[in-house]
Image: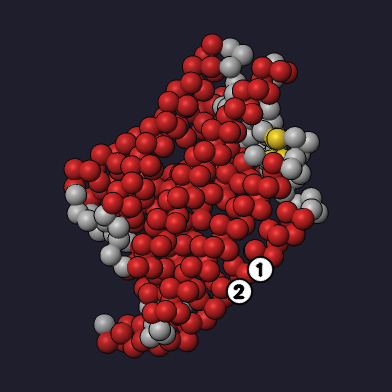
Amino acid sequence: MNALARHLIRELRPVRRPARVLYMGAAFWTASALVHLIALGTDGWAWSGAVSFRKPLTFSLSIALLMATMGWVLDRLPERPRLAGVIAWTFLVSSTVEVGLITMQAWRGRASHFNVMESGDAAVFALMGAMVGLMSLGLVALLVWSLIERPADPLVRVAVIGGLVLVTTGLGIGQWIIQLGVEYVGARGAVPETVTFGEAGVAKFPHAIAFHGIQLFILAAIALRTGSFPDSSKRRMMSLVVVSYTTILLFASAQTVAGRAPTDPTLWSLGLALSLAVLAIVIARTARAFDDQAAPELAEAAKVA
């Protein structure tokens, strides 16, 4: 287990300056998530509602994951310091301002999203929207760069491009969420506790799935690259991870568009459950293959070191 941990640390650590910058941002927002976990607990674990420490907690953790992910991807693309630096700093600054504003509103006891009833809150929400636009530019630029100058390793290539396509899809879902929220405020003159479509479709459900598949893809690529099993088997398992996860996103989106809550029993939730089962099987096989074939080699290398 120690050899496995050392292997993951070695594979995930930042190498170039833009990646190190993003990793520092990720460390800061991970610490913020821990602080807000404590704050949420002292507030009686008040998870629901438009005003809750849930928001800075979840947004801090989400943006920390995305920052670290972008840093890892930048390290696997051709070395172009200026381009990588522009992308890294654009994402770091814009995401820090956006999540900082969400955090500020939570501590003020004000709703951060769709709160346009007073001029001050409306200005905060408008600035958040501008920062999301800049973040989106950084993510799309990273996807375009990955398509033009693709990562050399085939497994990493699938993880990066497949994951960034899903992230871009998540950006589109985010725009849909904004539209739904604005329509809710216009119709009711109040801030929505949760943005829904139809009767109970939770719009952030597919949004979150789309944004965080790339981390799973990266871990799968790292595990599959190690070991002596055939390259064809590695590529097949990597493809199964991407396809099964994408299927999960499709079923989650269908469940939401049908106006049903994530756990409501429907044909879509059945498909979601089956896709999750397939993904779990593939991940278990990947982990087992890594453990059986790679861990002894890593342990031996650790003894030598």
Q: Residue at x 30, y 58 (%)?
A: 150
Left or right, 258 with respect to 149, comes to right
Under mark 2, the amino acid is: Ile
In the rendered structure, find residue 160 and report the number of the disc placed on it: none
Q: Residues within 10 Å of mark 2 (few under 14, many from 20)?
A: few
Left or right, 204 with respect to 255, comes to left
In the rendered structure, find residue 281 and report the number of the disc placed on it: 2
Under mark 1, the amino acid is: Ala
Q: Residue at x 42, y 85 (%)?
A: 229
- How far from the left and from the top, in percent, is residue 239? 48, 68
Which one is nearer the viewer's eye here, 69 or 237? 237
Identify the element where label 1 is drawn.
helix
Q: Residue at x 33, y 52 (%)?
A: 147
Can residue 186 be seen?
yes
- How far from the left and from the top, in percent, is residue 272? 68, 58
Q: Quadrant of the C terminus?
A: bottom left
Of all residues, the one furthest to the top in this rendering is 119
Above-or-below relation of 129 to 46: above
User: What is the count of numbered marks?
Assistant: 2
Left or right, 302 with respect to 245, comes to left
Which one is nearer the viewer's eye here, 296 or 172? 172
Q: Residues within 10 Å of mark 1 (few under 14, many from 20)?
A: few
Identify the element where label 2 is drawn.
helix
Which residue is under mark 1? 277
Marks 1 and 2 in Cβ contact (< 8 Å): yes
- How far from the left and from the top, in percent, is residue 195? 67, 33
- How far from the left and from the top, in percent, is residue 120? 52, 14
